[in-house]
Image: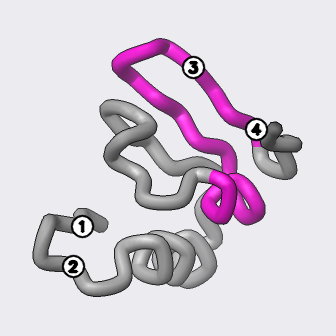
């Protein structure tokens, strides 16, 4: 699934794709590519390739 600048509700689209596909992770080039990483990590791990960082599902954000 891919969102673009024209995607009206990117976070909703990503979460819908996670639930629809029973995904355990989302992969993104950077955190800036995810409109609301806090919401994404409620449902799946978030792998950020550019920083080689993993935000685990259920992460407590500051």
Q: At x 31% / y 32%, what residue is drawn?
A: 29
2 or 4: mark nearer the eye: 2
Q: Tell me the residue at 26%/85% (across/down).
A: 8
Q: Over which residues does the magenta segment extend?
A: 38-56
Instruction: Please say whether residue 8 is one of the residues in the magenta stretch.
Output: no
Q: Residues within 10 Å of mark 2 (few under 14, many from 20)?
A: few
Of the numbered discs 2 and 4, the one sitting upstream in the chain is: 2
Do the residues under discs 1 and 3 have CB atoms within 8 angstroms? no
Q: Which residue is mark 3?
A: 53
- Residue found 81% across the figure and 38% down from its top: 62
Residue at far top of view = 52
Crowding at dot 4, Cα within 10 Å, few <14 / some 14-19 / many 20+, comes out as some
Image mark for residue 34:
none
Residue drawn 66% across the image and 64% down it: 39
Given contact means CB atoms under 8 Å apart, are the residues at marks 2 and 1 in contact? yes
Q: Which residue is mark 2?
A: 7
Find disc 4 in the rendering and name its residue.
Answer: 56
Residue 13, horizontal then vertical, whole percent: 41, 80
- Marks 2 and 4 sit apart, C-alpha to C-alpha, by 25 Å
Disc marking residue 3: 1
Q: Is residue 52 magenta?
A: yes
Relative vertical location of residue 60 with respect to residue 29 in this rendering, above or below: below
Q: How many marks?
A: 4
């Amino acid at each position: 699934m891919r969102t673009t600048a024209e995607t009206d509700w990117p976070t909703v689209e990503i979460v819908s794709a996670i639930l629809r596909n029973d995904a355990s992770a989302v992969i993104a080039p950077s955190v800036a590519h995810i409109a609301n990483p806090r919401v994404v990590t409620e449902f799946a791990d978030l792998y950020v390739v550019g920083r080689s960082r993993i935000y685990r599902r259920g992460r407590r954000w500051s």
